Each structure stands twice: as C-alpha cells, then as structure tokens.
Amino acid sequence: MAVLEEILADAAGGNFHEVEVGPDDELAAVELGVNTVLADLRRQIAETGALNRELDLKIAERTRELQAKLEQITNQHDLIQRQRDAILELSTPVMQLWTDIIAMPVIGIIDGTRADAIMERLLTAISNRRARHAILDLTGVESLDTASAAHFARIIAAAGLIGARCVLTGIQSSAALALTDLGVEFENIETHRDLQSGLRACLLEGRGAS
C-alpha cells in the first residue's frame, strides 16, 4: 500500500509511472487499476496539450487576421481623411486679390465642421500672406440660418484677433429674407452687395489708412 500511495502522490504531482504488477502480487488487481487510471490520465493530458496547441495556433492566426484588417481600416481611414482634406481645400480656395487683400469664395451648406475648415484656412492664409483684409464671398451659399450666421460671426471675430478686417459679400436675396424672418441681425458684421463692392471698400480703407 505504501508503494501505491507513493505512486498516487507522484501522479498528483504530474509524474505518471505505471506499477509493475507481479504474478503473485496480492494487490495485482489494484495495481492494474492504477495503471489504467495513469494511462488514461496521460492520454487526456496529451489530448489536452494537442488541443491547447491547436487553440494557440488558431488564436495566433485570428490575431494576424485582425491586425491585417485593422491596418487595412487604418489605411482606408487615412485615405478618406486625405480625400476629405483635398475636397475641403478645393471647396474653400483662397485668392489673392490685392497686395494685402485676400478672398475666399464659399459654396454650399455651412455647418460646424465646414465652418471650422473655413476658419482654419482663412486664418492660415491671413497669417502666411500678411493680409490686412479678408473677403468671404457667399454668392455660392443659397441658404443661411442662425447657426451659419453665428459661424461667420465667429470667423470674422477670429480674423480680427490676428489683425485682419473680414467682410461678407454676395449674400443671396433669399438668404437675406430668411435671416430677416429669423430675426438675425448683422450689427457687427460688415456686408457688401458683391465681391467687387467688397474689394472696393477694402481698397478705400487701405488708402485711407495710408
């Protein structure tokens, strides 16, 4: 029995040694049973190890697939962002009208994202070109509301903070009527009928300042 206890203790520690069964051993049946249990344990451990290795391979393969998909998504996101930036740049061009006068024709719908893009490009152009006057021409903007009016007020205020006078030109009659119906007032925003009128006003102020 002491031998069996020792073998079982070894098995509990992961060491599986079969019992040598003698022909005259009184405990032969028990020893055969122990050997059967030990053999079954070895088989189960071997099968479990094989399953674990297979699972590790599948996990590694799946991880590589996910990493590849993540890289693909990242590349697609970068491409979309570059295309978006290119579209925003094309939709908000900056023109040099005079030595210190720039103009930005604005087209389409003005939401928060578009307003931020307009502000960024306009302020960058003012700084890089040392412009003292900036004209936002809204001829291509068919509709305005309180939100878009607030966006333009914010852009004009930001331009003023870096020393540039910013005016709006070309507000469509339909947009003007809509703003009037909404009760929007342009008290602190300088507006002119068209781009030519805005340029003339900027030139006159420039001459007066000189």
Image: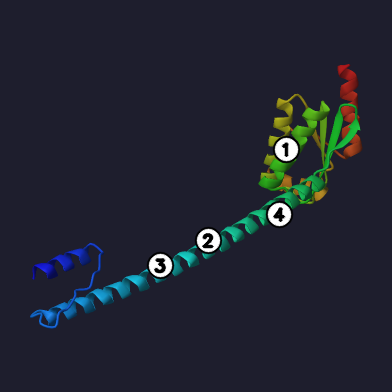
- Tag 3 residue: 52
Q: Quadrant of the N terminus?
A: bottom left
Tell me the residue at 79%/45% (across/down): 89
Circle 3 — which element?
helix
On the image, the x and y values in percent for residue 42 come to 30, 72
Q: CA distance from mark 1 to mark 3?
A: 58 Å
* Lateral position of residue 118 relative to residue 77, left or right: right
Check if mark 1's residue and mark 3's residue have beta carbons within 8 Å.
no
Give the residue number, with chain letter if any, for mark 4: 80
Front residue of 110 and 116: 116
Give the number of the disc on residue 63. 2
Mark with earlier residue (4, 3): 3
x and y percent of residue 182 in the render? 68, 46
Whether tag 4 and tag 3 are in contact, CB under 8 A, the answer is no
In-front residue for pair 121/61: 61
Q: Which residue is mark 1?
A: 119
Question: Do the residues under discs 2 and 1 have CB atoms within 8 angstroms?
Answer: no
